[in-house]
């Protein structure tokens, strides 16, 4: 082997050595669980005893005979298709407000960002108090005024919107991303548009939005993926109730894995969710060619 | 330009190599030098003089300081055993992970007992029962019913322990009863009477908001239970919903008690009842403990638990209501908790010692004095400190301890898929309460779903 080749090999080995902790972790905590769950999805497996191969039984039962799967998927799709746009619009609106010359902008930015870094359990405790029908922040005032309380978490109709409100409250990360995108729009473009007589709305519609579409795509995509997998909020706040109206897909998956000892079935649920999320993500990516503007193009 | 002695890249390489060498050296076995060797020899001499202590891990099931006190007493009584107490509620996923990783404790409690028994997680204790004839099954100091709760295919698996007595008591808030013009010394015996009491004790403000509730048909013991607790609605109607792994749910009695549950919920409104429960979730006995609900069927720990959070209200406990045609019958269920020895532990003997110790006077005194929990031995129950809590609290505790002896019927469950069953019940109850399905449809669906589930579970054994 020539000295050049030896030097090259040494460099490669050095590089591999330095990234080996990540490779080991990735294989142990990502690749192995992925492959294992794919295997277990074709078995009846309760973790406590060896898995029993059942072929596509789990998938067949989920797709054709499990009414709870359909209900949880329906709840999740509601949560995604109402919740993600609601959260997006909240973040977008607040970012645009923060992009103006408003007094105390730094303080506002901090206040809007704090919810996104608050631990979920603390968040749930606070919102349980806010939504409390006896002495909560909202209903306590309504009772004092002699008004009927709002059953946020005990009404089938209001439970999901109540969760979505909490989700909108915690959009700090998206607000920061949007704000960075808004501040990245070159001022000269706005100046040119003003000179040409463009109104504020036209500037917003034809300049601001197109220039921010890459970040909008990112926020929508990550929001979709995260919301499809939403677990902590419904589990802690409502435990899937009332009457399973907030039994989201991940909650049902968790129950199968750990409450019912059906890890094989839960693994199949996980892979079906992966396919669903992949399909939606692909659709968004495909559509992005029509509405996302990359400045370098 | 001066030649560089050490480039940046070289510096980083050397630094990384030194760091890696340091990590490897820290992990490598230490070289025993002469001085260290002599120290080791001295340590060995000292250790041989003292008895060898075995350390066993104990998951007591409840994270209270009382468990640590019990652990200290046990260690004092057994100097050859050291306890590593893991204070937490052993959630199912934690137990599964421990079994999968083979990091199980020696003794555990407050778990889904039957679901784990049928999956061969626990050690049968039949060969050890001969050591404890004074408390063992078939005539010992701990009632046979409590041993039977943890029995499967003819084998015994757990030593009954904490919070173990007759499992059901109808708690009545005497203040709310008196305010409603009810005589709490003559409690309701039928569900029709209980419904009348419920209506009398339910009140609203001018806006129609629920202020107080008479009874919640889905609260605590009337909810779908697991982890050693019997599901009592079928027992009230005089039948077992599962026997020898065969479900028997699709029957007229099931429809009847679904109707009872629906009647209570629709009288007030499901949303209002649910809102009240959610408002006080996490407090002891929920809104009943806070004096907002007039009646609640709860555990033997109920009397002390309610007194702790609401000492100004006097609550008394009595028999649960029954259907009209069985209102003359008093019913109790057996259940509770047990010390379970994990099958893969190396310290089964020590774990069994601890499990038996938990039934003893010292351990039970600690739990009783601290949180009002009842121990399983009859002899201990007879010598409970009657001055420990106010008279009405002790009266209720005494009622619980004597209820299994005084009841006309004592029931318990053996359901190997109790987690799935509990979920099915909860879904069915809620669907019936919300009017999504009829009671008859609920009974039929449950029969079909649970029969399919238990068939699959048994096939996998």
Image (spheres, coloured by chain):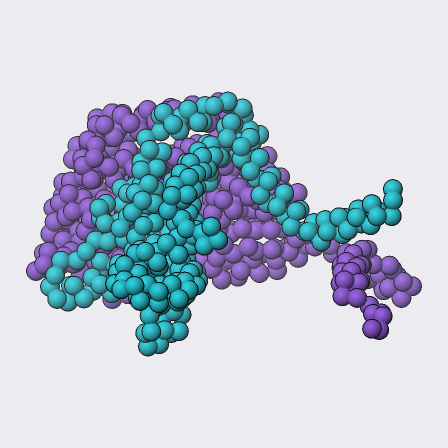
Q: Quadrant of residue A178?
A: bottom left
In this structure image, what is the colour of chain B?
A: purple
| Image: A118 above or below B345 | below
Q: Residue at x 32, y 74 (%)?
A: A102
Q: Is residue B227 left or right of residue B310?
A: right
Q: Position of residue A25 (x, y in %)?
A: 63, 48
Q: Residue furthest bottom?
A: A103
Q: Residue furthest front?
A: A196
Can residue A179 be seen in the rendering of this structure?
no
Residue pictured at 35% horizontal, 59% vertical:
A208
Give the side of residue B256 with respect to residue A283, left or right: left
Q: Is residue B155 above or below residue B103?
A: above
Task: Farthest residue to the right: give it.
Answer: B34
- In the picture, which chain is cyan? A
Q: Residue A79, position in %: x, y?
A: 32, 45
Q: Nearer the viewer, residue A22 or B102?
A: A22
Q: x%, y% of residue A199?
A: 25, 63
Q: Point out residue B454 in the picture as x, y percentages from the top left corner.
A: 41, 26
Who is closer to the viewer here, A26 or A150? A26
Q: Residue at x 50, y 23 (%)?
A: A54
Please identify the quadrant where the N terminus of chain B is shown.
bottom right
Across the whole image, how many numbered discs are drawn on residues? 0
In this rendered view, identify the residue nearer to me: A221 or B316. A221
Q: Describe residue B84's horizontal placement relative to residue A57 as left or right.
A: right
Q: Is residue A16 visible?
A: yes
Extreme residue in the left direction: B206
Residue at 63% across, 43% down: A27
């Amino acid at each position: 082997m020539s000295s050049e080749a030896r030097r090259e090999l040494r460099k490669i080995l050095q590089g591999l050595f330095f990234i080996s902790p990540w490779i080991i972790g990735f294989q142990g905590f990502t690749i192995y669980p992925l492959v294992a769950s794919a295997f277990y999805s074709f078995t009846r497996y309760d973790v406590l005893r060896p898995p029993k191969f059942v072929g596509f039984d789990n998938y067949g039962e989920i797709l054709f005979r499990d009414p709870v799967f359909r209900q949880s998927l329906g709840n999740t799709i509601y949560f995604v298709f109402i919740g993600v746009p609601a959260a997006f619009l909240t973040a977008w609106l607040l970012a645009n407000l923060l992009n103006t010359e408003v007094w105390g902008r730094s303080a506002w930015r901090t206040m809007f960002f704090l919810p996104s870094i608050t631990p979920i359990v603390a968040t749930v405790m606070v919102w349980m108090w806010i939504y409390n029908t006896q002495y909560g922040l909202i209903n306590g005032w309504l009772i004092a005024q002699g008004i009927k309380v709002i059953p946020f978490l005990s009404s089938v109709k209001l439970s999901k919107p109540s969760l979505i409100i909490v989700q909108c409250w915690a959009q700090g990360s998206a607000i920061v991303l949007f704000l960075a995108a808004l501040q990245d729009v070159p001022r000269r473009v706005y100046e040119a548009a003003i000179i040409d007589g463009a109104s504020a709305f036209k500037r917003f519609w034809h300049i601001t939005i197109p220039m921010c579409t890459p970040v909008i795509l990112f926020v929508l995509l990550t929001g979709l993926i995260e919301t499809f997998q939403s677990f902590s909020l419904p589990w802690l706040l409502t435990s899937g109730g009332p009457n399973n109206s907030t039994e989201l897909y991940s909650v049902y998956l968790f129950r199968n894995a750990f409450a019912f000892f059906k890890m094989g079935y839960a693994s199949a649920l996980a892979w079906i969710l992966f396919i669903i999320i992949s399909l939606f993500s692909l659709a968004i990516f495909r559509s992005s060619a029509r509405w996302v503007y990359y400045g370098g193009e | 330009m001066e030649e560089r002695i050490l480039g940046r890249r070289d510096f980083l390489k050397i630094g990384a190599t030194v760091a890696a060498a340091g990590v490897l050296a820290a992990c490598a076995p230490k070289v025993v030098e002469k001085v260290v060797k002599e120290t080791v020899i001295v340590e060995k001499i000292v250790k041989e003089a003292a008895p060898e202590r075995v350390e066993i891990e104990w998951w007591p099931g409840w994270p209270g300081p009382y468990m640590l006190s019990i652990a200290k007493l046990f260690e004092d009584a057994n100097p050859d055993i050291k306890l590593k107490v893991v204070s937490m509620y052993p959630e199912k996923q934690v137990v599964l992970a421990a079994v999968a990783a083979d990091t199980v404790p020696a003794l555990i409690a407050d778990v889904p007992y039957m679901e784990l028994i049928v999956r061969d997680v626990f050690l049968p204790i039949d060969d050890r029962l001969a050591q404890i004839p004074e408390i063992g099954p078939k005539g010992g100091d701990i009632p046979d019913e409590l041993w039977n709760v943890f029995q499967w295919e003819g084998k015994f698996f757990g030593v009954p322990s904490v919070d173990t007595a007759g499992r059901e008591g109808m708690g009545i808030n005497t203040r709310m009863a008196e305010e409603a013009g009810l005589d709490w010394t003559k409690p309701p015996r039928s569900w029709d009477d209980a419904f009348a009491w419920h209506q009398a004790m339910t009140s609203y403000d001018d806006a129609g908001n629920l202020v107080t509730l008479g009874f919640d048909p889905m609260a605590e013991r009337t909810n779908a239970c697991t982890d050693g607790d019997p599901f009592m609605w079928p027992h009230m109607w005089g039948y077992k919903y599962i026997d020898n792994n065969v479900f028997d749910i699709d029957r007229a009695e099931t429809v009847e008690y679904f109707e009872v549950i629906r009647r209570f919920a629709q009288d007030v409104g499901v949303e209002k009842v649910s809102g009240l429960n959610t408002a006080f979730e996490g407090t002891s006995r929920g809104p009943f403990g806070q004096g907002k609900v007039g009646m609640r069927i709860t555990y033997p720990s109920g009397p002390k638990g309610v007194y702790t959070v609401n000492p100004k209200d006097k609550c008394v406990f009595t028999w649960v209501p029954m259907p009209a045609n069985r209102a003359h019958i008093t019913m109790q269920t057996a259940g509770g908790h047990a010390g379970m020895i994990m099958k893969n532990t190396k310290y089964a003997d020590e774990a069994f010692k601890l499990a038996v110790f938990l039934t003893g006077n010292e351990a039970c005194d600690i739990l009783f004095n601290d949180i009002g929990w009842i121990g399983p031995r009859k002899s201990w129950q007879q010598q409970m400190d009657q001055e420990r809590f106010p008279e009405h609290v002790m009266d209720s505790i005494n009622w619980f301890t004597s209820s299994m002896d005084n009841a006309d019927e004592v029931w318990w469950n053996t359901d190997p898929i109790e987690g799935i069953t509990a979920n099915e019940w909860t879904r069915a109850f809620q669907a019936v309460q919300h009017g999504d399905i009829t009671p008859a449809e609920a009974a039929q669906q449950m029969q079909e779903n649970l029969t399919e589930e238990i068939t699959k579970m048994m096939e996998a054994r």
